[in-house]
Amino acid sequence: MNFLGLELLKRFLLRLGLDLRKLILISTILTVSGLFVVSVFILNYVIKQQLIQNSLSVNERYAEKIATSTNQHFADMLKELEYSAKVLEKNFYNIDLRKSEVERLKNQSDNFNSVLLVGGNKHVFAFSPSSLNFNFGQAYNSLGIVESTEKKKTYISTPYWSVKNNLLVMMSQPIYNGKDNYLGMISGSIYLQRKNLLNTMLNTQYDYKKSYMYVIDQHNRIIFHPDKNRIGEKIINNTGLDFINQHKNGSIRLKNSLGIDNLAGFAHIPSVNWIVISQQPTDALLAQAHTLLFKVSVGIFIFYLFIFLLVWWISNFISSPLNRLAKMASMLNQHDIQDKIKKVDPWYFEVLKFRTSLLLSSENFRNRITELKQHVNTDPLTGLYNRRGMEVFLKELVNTQTAFAALVIDIDFFKKINDQYGHDQGDVVLKTLAQIMQTNFREHDICCRSGGEEFLVLMTTADPLVAHKAAERLRLTMQDNQINQMGKITISIGIAFWPKDAVDVAAVLKIADNKLYEAKHSGRNCIRSTVKSSA
């Protein structure tokens, strides 16, 4: 099957008539085009994969950085609460101290949105800001107050809704008078939906190609997000959530709860078991890849175009001598062909061998013509080739595919010349015409006496103008030549061309005969050809 396909391809290329230079160029175009397409495909894959890996790595490092700094921030906030607890335990029941310490803790750093001093009976003893309006005589049972007073130790709550309808996280430190006498706790709260120092810190993220960061708690609820409307929302249908909950940090390509493909990096905050997630929409990142790919593709295209032009020049340089020699191979009959072949520079092995073979073929062709001239029978009267010699030359011309013009020549009123002046004078006329023919035509044109007063010239040319000029020159010379006071003797000529007029040589000679008869019927002393000359 492969062999058959190869043969069909060879035949197709042969029909196209492609030379070596065109074949090299077509091969180069196909190769360069293929390389360009493959290069762009590989670049597209490599660039996208590299950008995706870089994005995952950057998001992971950024999430780790935010998680570490947030964890440290929580530790600092707990230290602030611990310091206040030590101050209050010395004089817990001092109302002025309670109020001043709560105010100081609230205003000195803006770490907390609100600060509460709560007793062991869940009563609020002091608060800041004053807009909270807690009732000092009432016990409060919010999640943070209940769990903190029950645990009686350092405490950070999960996000919950307070009695004042704020989504918050509460941090507290216990206050003891001695080792076992629990007095209450000092707490600071972060309102997740309002501005605070933690919120401000988390908002100082980079914003590159629509990247953003959010934080979820241990119950997969959003406690920080650039879109404040999503704070408090529980995450569902996130394809990477299980992986994120199972690992302390890492990166993953996922589809979020909105179905958007994202490249996410994440890290846990140990003190609160929250998860910081930094992510970037994949489409926004790959838009950058398309821009980068376009720029790289243009550069590659310019490079391949340069390669193509270089190969085109080299192919022309390599194929030029072979192309010239190939054209000369069909012109071995020309008398100056050897000089033309020798002018071709054989600068590489194949050209040298081809040139040598052509020179040998040309020499052999000349030797064969000489040999034919010496051995083929000639007409004893005129010295021209007879019909047998004509047949040999016709065969040689056909075998070498050399186009020729057949000129059939007849002496006008030759019978009258024989009757009036005698056969001896008729022979003089025949020999005179033969001599004029040999002088009139080129060395490699074949002049023959085909019988009686009829002659034939085989001119190795396909140009009607060249053939017509030679025939006209012969006619005029014969007309102007005076032979033994016999008066003006004229000739008629018919011309046909091989293979233009017919592929069969006999048919061409018959056509030339018909043209001769046409010249006779047109008044003699004229030329008729299958192709009209513009001369």
Image: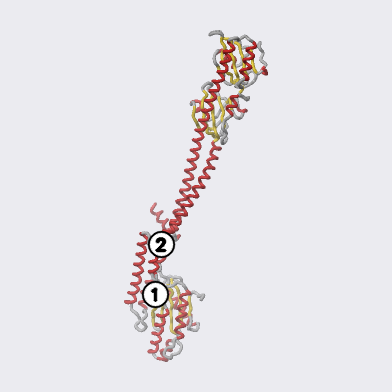
* Colour scheme of the picture: secondary structure
**Visible in this render: residue 352?**
yes
Amino acid under disc 1: His
| Total numbered labels placed on residues in the image | 2
Is there a contact, CB below 8 Å, between mark 1 and mark 2? no
Q: Nearer the viewer, residue 72 or 211?
A: 72
Provide residue 162's location: percent of width, then percent of height: 62, 19
Q: Does residue 221 lie above or below 286 as drawn?
A: above
Disc 2 target residue: 321
**Visible in this render: residue 1?**
no
**Residue at point 61%, 22% (across, down):** 110
The quadrant in which residue 324 appears is bottom left
Disc 1 target residue: 444
Provide residue 481's location: percent of width, then percent of height: 44, 86
Provide residue 144's location: percent of width, then percent of height: 59, 17
Q: Nearer the viewer, residue 113 or 216?
A: 113
Amino acid under disc 2: Pro
Distance between mark 1 and mark 2 Cα atoms: 27 Å
